[in-house]
Amino acid sequence: MATTNELKNGMVLNLDGQLWNIIDFQHVKPGKGGAFVRTKLKNVLSGKVVDRTFNAGVKIETAQVDKRDMQYLYKDGDDWVFMDTTNYDQITISNATVGDASNYMLENQEVMVAMHEGNPLYIEMPANVELTIEYTEPGLQGDRSNAGSKSAKLETGFEIQVRCLLIKVRKFELTLETVLILVVPKDN
């Protein structure tokens, strides 16, 4: 349990049987009336974002979320197998929990897995990953009908948009926060 005065960004709360991550909070002391805390919360499982206000000093139930460094080993049907890098235990995580991370994950890649009471909640990818573009149509000089971008297939099978002038198949470092990429070529 924590009071609203102890709230911090990144803290996980257990509200109404669901886990919520604090994205932003603000203590407000109006001139008239009691103080309160305005928060922006993100549901850990669904990703839904809501605004919620609490009175100052109210106790709120917190949840213990353990973030572990894990290595993606292989895909087993619809499940993904990961290994804890500290104790070498292997766990199986469902496709729904892996989510969009599967588009950028290669075997033996290090990721962060958030766990609550032994159950995996979500996967955090590193900010940048290095992937190879396997195929892209050749860009034509002067063709601007598609705003200077074209589709390219990554080695994971996922398609992304890249600049039209990209011709050769190369390794690129992708910034996952902005997936319409500004690709940075890596020297081969």
Image: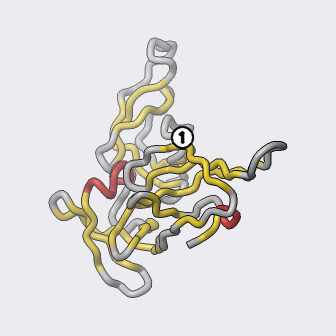
Q: Is residue 2 left or right of residue 122?
A: right
What's the residue at 15%, 60% (across, down)?
77
Q: Around disc 1, counting alpha carbons within 10 Å, would you say few (fewer than 14), some (14 to 19), or many (20 or more)?
A: few
Residue 91 to residue 187: above or below? below
Q: Residue 55: x, y in percent?
A: 65, 54
Residue 153 to residue 119: above or below? above
Residue 60 to residue 181: above or below? below
Q: Quadrant of residue 56?
A: bottom right
State the residue lying farthest toward the right: 31
Q: Residue 100: x, y in percent?
A: 36, 48
Residue 47 visible, this orientation: yes
Residue placed most toward the observer, 66 or 169: 66
Q: How many marks?
A: 1
What's the residue at 53%, 54% (across, down)?
128
Residue placed most toward the observer, 158 or 67: 67
Residue 7 visible, this orientation: no
Q: Is residue 118 left or right of residue 68?
A: left
- Tag 1 residue: 178
What's the residue at 51%, 68% (across, down)?
61
Is disc 1 placed on a helix, strand or loop? loop
Residue 174 to residue 77: above or below? above
State the residue lying farthest toward the front: 33
Residue placed most toward the observer, 170 or 21: 21
Q: Is residue 59 left or right of residue 98?
A: right
Q: Quadrant of the N terminus?
A: bottom right
Amino acid residing under circle 1: Thr
State the residue lying farthest toward the left: 77
What's the residue at 42%, 80% (across, down)?
85
Q: Residue 60: x, y in percent?
A: 55, 65
Q: Residue 81: x, y in percent?
A: 27, 69
State the colouring used for the structure image.
Answer: secondary structure
